[in-house]
Amino acid sequence: MNALFEILDQLAEFIWGYVGFILIILFGLYFAVTSRFYQVRKFPQILKSFLIGLGSRNSSGEGLHPIKVFFAAIGGCIGIGNIVGICTAVQIGGPGALFWTWIAGFLGMLLQYGEVFLGMKTRVKTKSGFSGGPMHFLPKAFKGKWVAIVVAGLLCVYGVEIFMFNVITESVSSNWNIAKPLAIALLLGMTLFAAKGGVKRVSDICSTIIPLFILVYVLMSLWVITQNIHLIPSIFKMIFASAFTGKAAEGAFAGSSVMLAISMGLSRGAYAGDLGVGYTSVIHSESGEKNPEKQAALTIIGIFFTIFLICTSSIFLILATGVWKESMDVTLMVQSALSGYFPYMDIFMPFFLLVLGYSTIISYFVVGVKCSKFLSEKYGPMLYYAYAFISLPLFSFVSPNQAFIVMSLAGAFLMIFNLLGLFLLRKEIAFDTVKEISSEALKEI
C-alpha cells in the first residue's frame, strides 16, 4: 500500500506541479487580462454587494438566499484545509509554497468565477430546487455527454471528504481520549443528518458557523503575529526567496525543489479554495439570484477569505512561532503555535477542527449526493452512501497525507476538465453586467 501511495503521490505532484501550474497560470492570466483584472477592479463593489446581502438572510422567490449559498460553498473550503492542509504545503515544499498559494488564489478567483457563472447559466430546475455545475456546462465544451458522467463520478469521489474525516477523528480521539470507532460513528451520524436536509440544511449550518470562525481565528492569529511583528520582514523574505530557489532558509526542508514548492502551493491552495474543481459551481447553482455575474462575483470574496485571510494566517502562525521547523504531526502545528499564547488549546483546537471540519464534510457530501442523483436518480444515492460508509472509516486509520493524496488526485483530474472547459467556453463568460450599487442601497447595510 505504501508503494501504491508513493506512485499516486508522484502522479498528483506531476499534475499539480506541471499540468496544473500551466493551466492555472495561463488561463488565470487570460481571464485576468481580458476582464481587465476584474477581481481587483471590482473588489470594492463586490464587497459592498456582499455586505448588503448579509443584512438580509431571507430568500425571495425560487432557490436559496445568495449569501446562505455563499456560506455553504465556502463551508467546504474554510476549515481544516486552511489550518492543516495548507500547513502540509510548508511542511513538504517549504515556506515558498505560500507564494504559489497566493498566485493560485489571485488567478483562481476568476477561474472559480467562470465556473459559477457557467453553472448558473446552464442550471436546470428540479423538484427540489436547481441542478447546476460542470455536469451541465462541460458537455457543451467537449461536445459530448461522456464528460458529464466522468466529472459527476469524480465529484462523487471528491464529495466523500476522507482527509477531513481522518483529521477530525484522530484529533478528537487523541485529545479527548475517545475511542476512534466511537468518534467515527458519531461523525458519520452527524454527516448523514446534514446530508438528508440537502443544500438548505447545509447552508443553514454553515451560515451560522463560518462567520464566527473567521472572526475568532483571525483575531487569535493577529494577536500572535503582532507579538512577533519584528519577524514579519524576515518571513516575507523567506517566503519569496524559497519560492524561486526551492530552498527554505533553514529547517528540515532545505533542498526542496522549486517544482515541489509550486506543486504543494498550487495543490493546497486549490484544495483550500476549491479552485477548478467544480464543487463551488454545484452549490452556487442553488441560489435564488437570477443574475449569473452577481452570484459568481461572490466567489471572489470567498477566495479572499479562504486563501488570503485564513491560509495566510495559518502559515504566518507557524512561521512566526518557529513551529514549522519542529518535527511534529501536521495536525498539531497550528495548535502548538497558538498554545504558547492562549490556554486550553488542547481542548479548544480539537473542538474547533471538529466544527469546521464538519462544515466541510457536509458541504462536500451534499454535492456528492447531487452528483450521484445526476448519474442515476434511483441507484446513484444508494451507491454513493455505500462508498462513503466504507471509505470514511477505512481512511480514518491511514496517514492524513495518504488520505489527502486521494483527494488531491480527484481534484487534479477535475481541475483539468473544468479549466479546459472554461477556456473552451470563455466567450460565454461575461463581466461587468451588474450596475454600480447606489449610495441609497448602501444605507441598507
Image (spheres, rainbow, N blue to C red):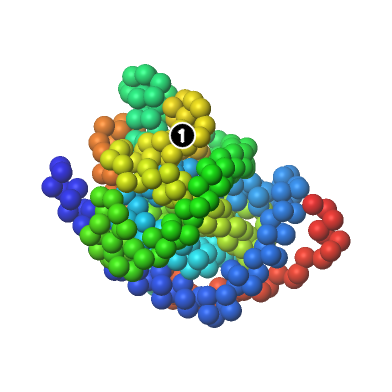
What is the x, y in percent for residue 13? 26, 59
What is the x, y in percent for residue 177? 37, 19
Q: Amino acid at mark 1?
A: Gly
* Quadrant housing the N terminus: top left
What is the x, y in percent for residue 366? 48, 43
Q: Quadrant of residue 265?
A: bottom left
Q: How many marks?
A: 1
- Residue receiving disc 1: 340
Q: Quadrant of residue 423?
A: bottom left
The structure residue drawn at horizontal position 86% and vertical position 61%, both measured from the top left corner, is 440
The structure residue drawn at horizontal position 31% and vertical position 58%, both measured from the top left corner, is 248
SS category of the residue bearing label 1: loop
Evaluate whether residue 31 shows in this view.
yes
Evaluate whether residue 185 shows in this view.
no
Q: Is residue 68 left or right of residue 351?
A: right
Of all residues, the one furthest to the front in this rendering is 230
Q: Is residue 71 left or right of residue 423?
A: right
Quick check: 34 above or below 226?
below
Quick check: 237 above or below 305?
below
Of the pair 398 and 335, the residue shown nearer to us: 335
The structure residue drawn at horizontal position 70% and vertical position 69%, both measured from the top left corner, is 434
Quick check: 215 above or below 170?
below
What is the x, y in percent for residue 427? 53, 79
What is the crowding at mark 1: few (fewer than 14 residues within 10 Å), some, or many (at least 20)? Answer: few
Of the pair 276 and 178, the residue shown nearer to us: 178
Quick check: 341 above or below 28?
above
The structure residue drawn at horizontal position 26% and vertical position 53%, both measured from the top left corner, is 253
Q: Is residue 111 left or right of residue 179?
A: right
